[in-house]
Structure formats: C-alpha cells, structure tokens
Image (cartoon, rainbow, N blue to C red):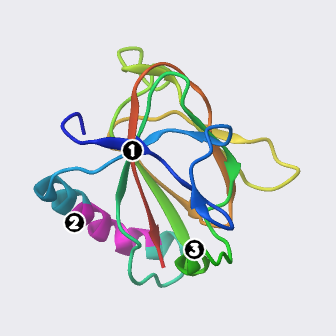
Amino acid sequence: MDAGDPEPAQILDERIDTNEAVRRAVHIEIDAATLTFLEGRLDEARPLIERFFRIPVNDREGASTLRYAAGGFFKRHRDWGRLPSWPDAARRRIAVVLFLTTSREADPSGTFTGGMLRLFADDNAAPIDVAPHEGTLVAFPATMLHEVTEVQDGTRDAVVDWYY
C-alpha cells in the first residue's frame, strides 16, 4: 500500500462523494499481484461465510484497500442501501473487513491506537468493539450499523469487500 497513490475514500449517498466530516480515510490502488492474492483469500472465505450466515453468497463487489492515518474515522453507517449513485449497494448481503495491521488494543506491539471496528447489533444492545489484528477477517450483515472509531496514532490498513 505504501507504493500506491492514495485518494480520499468516498461515501455512498445520493451521489458518490467525499465528506471528511463523515469519513476520513484514503483508498489506495495496490499492485495487481497483491490484489489477486487478496481476492483469492476472500474467495476462499466464501464457504465459511455461507455456513456461518446460513445463506448462499455469489459474487463479491471487489476488494478495496483502505488506510486510516491518525485522525481517520468513518462515522456510523450501513453498507447496504438503495442508492441511485451505486445500485449494487442493494445487492450487498455480507460485508467483510480484513485487517492488515494490528492495533495496540489487540496487541501491545501493534502499530496504531484506536481505529476499532464498532458494530451495533441492534438499538438496545451495547456496541461490540473489534480491535484490529493483522490477518483477522470480520464478516457481518451489510445492513448492520457500524463505524470505525478515530485512529489516535499510527496507521490502520484494511481490505473491505461485500458478498452479494
């Protein structure tokens, strides 16, 4: 990711746009060989995801690599929606996050602080904070409300994708 060209990560709404009040992160295009490797790992996870969620999943939207530097975050949102700007958002069934770096909350030798993946199971339940740990894949319904808490220092790298 260090070799790629970062561009502001976008949000899906009525338009596809950037809004640093909602999301402060960058998307980085990675080399083809690394992308192929990551896509292969996500394809290998498909049977586990189908078994866990007890639903068939088909295609994936396509892996995206994201970097959150100090001060980076993504406010509460859902990855599913009926949006004219991105009609395929309505096809999303399962969201996945593959952590590429480790937080100090997960391991004291980690490379950053903060940047939790916070999941909101329902309106009445306490949120679930997932401390990023390199190599961990987290899957959840694309309709689930979630956020990335602010990275306090260091750099949080992750891959995101959606199974249809």
Magenta stretch: dominant SS? helix
**Dot 2 alpha-carbon crowd within 10 angstroms: few under 14, some 14 to 19, many 20 or more:** few
Q: Is residue 39 above or below residue 4?
A: below
Along the line of sight, the residue nearer the viewer: 83 or 46: 83
Q: Is mark 1 on a helix, strand or loop?
A: strand
- Identify the residue at image location x=27%, y=68%: 44
Nearer to us of marks 3 and 2 is 3
Q: Can residue 124 be seen in this view?
A: yes
Q: Position of residue 53 (x, y in %)?
A: 55, 72
Q: In this view, does 161 lie above or below 69?
A: below
Q: Is residue 99 visible?
A: no
Nearer to us of marks 1 and 3 is 1
Residue ID for mark 1: 7
Q: Classify residue 12 by image quadrant.
A: bottom right
Sequence-earlier tag: 1 or 3 = 1
Q: Position of residue 109 (x, y in %)?
A: 35, 15
Discs 1, 3 touching: Cβ within 8 Å? no
Q: Range of the magenta residues?
A: 39-49
Along the line of sight, the residue nearer the viewer: 60 or 9: 9
Sequence-earlier tag: 1 or 2 = 1
Q: Classify residue 41 by image quadrant.
A: bottom left
Sequence-earlier tag: 3 or 2 = 2
* Furthest-right residue in this view: 124
**Dot 1 alpha-carbon crowd within 10 angstroms: few under 14, some 14 to 19, many 20 or more:** some
Residue ID for mark 3: 89
Q: Is residue 40 within the magenta segment?
A: yes
Nearer to us of marks 1 and 2 is 1
Alpha-carbon distance for marks 1 and 3?
Answer: 21 Å
Along the line of sight, the residue nearer the viewer: 94 or 78: 78
Residue ID for mark 2: 40
